[in-house]
Amino acid sequence: MRIIGVCRFSYPALGGFKRMHDSVAEREAYLYAPARMALRFAHFETLTLPSVAAQTDPDFTFLIVIGQNMPQPWLGRLHALCAPVPQIKIVPCAPLKHRLALQLAIQDELGEERPESIQFRLDDDDAMGVDFVELARSVARRTGRLRRRERRTAIEFNTGYSATLSKDGIIAEDVISSFWACGLGVHFAEGDDKTIMNFGHHKLHHLMPSIIHPHPPMYIRAKHTDNDSEAKFRPRRLKPLSDAQRQIFQTRFNVDEERVQDAFAALDAPPGKG
């Protein structure tokens, strides 16, 4: 059984953003602005990448879809960061509708035989539990009769955290969600030519059987000014991490608050400083 995750990293999609642009060139100029890229990398380096690298089951592939024109130094930085993680593949893609681009990346990775798979999404500023791959595979194996009967089955871990990161550290709140993209996977039977990107994550439970696990906490969803959905998901009840939460972030997500503080302090440092 293949397990494949997909992530878009500042990919200049045709549509798929709340912020609209009149041309691909305008979209790229917005996406690759230095201040924005520095913020995206600060989140990726302290949330997404550590959680992917620390997976307890190493048998998975994580596709990062990028634009063909990502400039230096960002392109080199992304490759350097991801090189130590053998599960990561960076996939340059021409501008397409974002769902189509991610679908094609997954389908190309699966190949023409379309083996049985579990597929998941992860934004470049979110984290997943270090045992997401292990537990998703375990759920699939323990529900073999359902898998054999149903072409597709959603697997949701519906508890986690919303968090905002800064040079002061992490503020967060516990969250119980309903089919957010993070903490969610879909099992596909062998031969299925659909992918997780063919379905809106909020409507998966309308379209297929769904298995919901309330424990353990399985995601950290970042809230910040560059969220494409920032207007809808503004920080409200976020509080500094307790000692217990700090330990959970470290052990369950491989997210270290001191590393966060250093990364975000560097955003405010004058050029050549810090």
Image: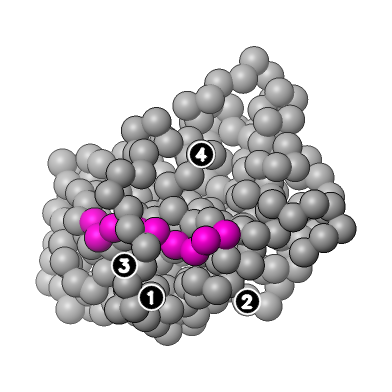
Three-letter amino acid code of the residue under disc 2: Pro
Is the residue under label 2 in contact with that under label 4 (CB below 8 Å)?
Answer: no
What type of secondary structure mainly makes up the magenta span?
A: strand
Picture residue at 23% right of the left edge, 40% below the top: 203
- The disc placed on residue 86 is 2
**Along the viewing direction, whichever of 80 and 138 lies nearer the viewer:** 80
Residue occupied by mark 3: 218
Picture residue at 17% right of the left edge, 67% below the top: 213
Q: How far apart are marks 1 and 2 (CA)?
A: 28 Å
Q: In which quarter of the image is residue 217?
A: bottom left
**Along the viewing direction, whichever of 154 and 111 lies nearer the viewer:** 154
Report crowding for label 3: few under 14, some 14 to 19, many 20 or more residues within 10 A (C-alpha).
many
The image position of residue 55, as x and y in percent, is 45, 79
Q: How far apart are marks 4 and 2 (CA)?
A: 31 Å
Image-based side of 202 in relation to 261, left or right: left
Disc tally is 4
- The disc placed on residue 246 is 1
N-term-proximal mark, 1 vs 3:
3
The image position of residue 250, as x and y in percent, is 43, 78
N-term-proximal mark, 1 vs 2:
2
| Vertical arrangement, residue 32 with respect to residue 78, above or below | above
Q: Distance between the residues labelled 3 and 4?
A: 23 Å
